Image (cartoon, rainbow, N blue to C red):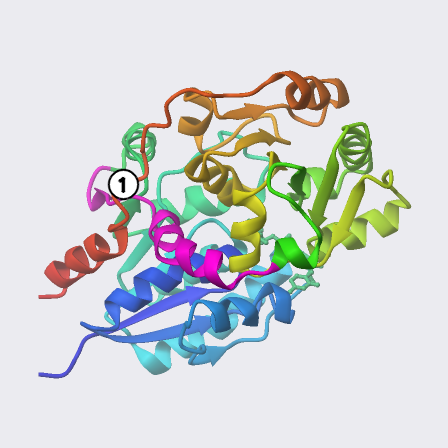
Amino acid sequence: MSLKTIVSIVGARPQFIKSAPVSRVLSAHFRTLLIHTGQHYDYGMSDIFFDEMQIHPPDFNLGVGGGLHGEQTGRMLIELEKVLAEVMPHYVLVYGDTNSTLAGALASAKAGIPLAHVEAGLRSYNRTMPEEINRVLTDHISTLLFCPTDTAVENLTKEGIVNGVYRVGDVMYDALLHNLAIARARSQVLDRLSLKKGEYALATVHRAANTDNAERMRLILDGLSALTMQIVFPVHPRTRKMIQEWGLAANSNVFFIEPQGYFDILMLQENADCILTDSGGMQKEAYLLGVRCITLREETEWVETVASGWNYLAGVDRQAIRTAFETWHPQGERPLPYGDGQAAEQICEILSNELR
Ligand code: UD1
């Protein structure tokens, strides 16, 4: 009997991490193909993750990087339609909330191919975020919805989505468990940057709401500059471009470095005194690693990290960032809302039943 074909569509950095555990499990049971939209294309934003996590190189790379949101999503849709018509998979998997997710979801739904959304049901309830639009629309056209948390399942129920919904846990937790020991053994980032555990903070910023707003970006850099600790700041290409465009700067305690690979960023997180970020993935990783996180946004999709007291929503207010950094040291329990590290196995089992 020939194997059924499952296509995963990825394009941006967090999706390479999310798809790695899923593709590893699925490839033992299905013919798995990977389409890379090309949304992220620099070595440090893309290839390094394939190398480190031993992800099979993409079977198709659409080369659609850069451009405005509509243009980027539209070009992906045009190219994806052609590839899906050629491959005619039995299922398409999309991950998370990027423009690649939405383009993959639309292409698959329009081609009549069943669609599974990994990391379904997350909501910030802030419709000005491109990611919120991407995830709401993707959820509403998905056949299977793989939720990381109970809250995600409840969010879908509120929108009337109840069929095909499974709470499988978070594939990023799978990835973390699989890679943490490897990262500890291999990464030399602390030595390379002359950093000591607990003696620096790690910052990242890449959300459009922050980077594309000169005032918010200035407040964040001022906030970081006012902290009495060395801040290591891996700079996303979008952020670098906007900092230059706005002519912004930070004090010498803020140390800008290139985007880091998965192993190095895990080690930079695990050993930091504090993480300051607007990234969803890093809020979760901070929580799982037991590092306090100050989130540079007004709301979060990962509400469990806030409810447990380990994530503080400071927005971009200088004083709020500083007060939290100096006075807030969470110590409470960290319940595990993200499953048991077997989300990929559960996804595989559900897909196997669907395709039987
Ligand atoms: C995207 C996702 C965001 C995700 C993030 C992870 C959307 C709407 N946003 O944001 O949800 O958290 O990825 O990083 O999909 N660029 C480079 N080199 C690269 C990649 C991008 O120079 O390798 C440049 C692009 O040309 C563009 C800018 O960075 O000018 C932004 O890239 P884009 O992919 O549009 O969005 P992200 O900000 O990365």
Decide if residue 2 is on the left or right side of residue 81.
Answer: left
The answer to whether residue 104 is visible is: yes
Per the image, is 181 magenta?
A: yes
Residue 15 placed where, x, y %?
A: 46, 58
341 part of magenta stretch:
no
Q: Is residue 38 left or right of residue 333?
A: right
The front one of 92 and 324 is: 324
Quadrant where the C terminus is found in the figure: bottom left
Residue 105 seen in the current view: no
In percent of width and height, residue 209 lies at: 67, 38
Q: Nearer the viewer, residue 348 or 21?
A: 21
Q: In the orientation shown, which residue stands out farthest toward the right?
A: 247
Q: Where is 332 relative to 264, above or below?
A: above
- Of residue 242 and residue 190, the one placed in the foreground of this image is 190
Left or right: 243, with 110 as reference point = right
Q: Is residue 325 toward the left or the right of residue 10 in the image?
A: right
Res 241 → quadrant: bottom right
Residue 314 place in picture, x, y as percent: 63, 23
Question: Quarter containing ligand 1?
Answer: bottom right
Mark 1: which secondary structure? loop
Q: Is residue 121 above or below residue 72?
A: above
Q: Quadrant of the N terminus?
A: bottom left
Q: Dot 1 corresponds to which residue?
A: 339
Q: Residue at x 38, y 61 (%)?
A: 19
Task: Give the residues in magenta.
Answer: 162-188
Q: Residues within 10 Å of mark 1 (few under 14, many from 20)?
A: some
Total numbered badges shown on the rendered structure? 1
* x and y percentages locating residue 177 in the rendered image: 35, 51
Task: State the residue at coordinates (46%, 79%).
Answer: 60
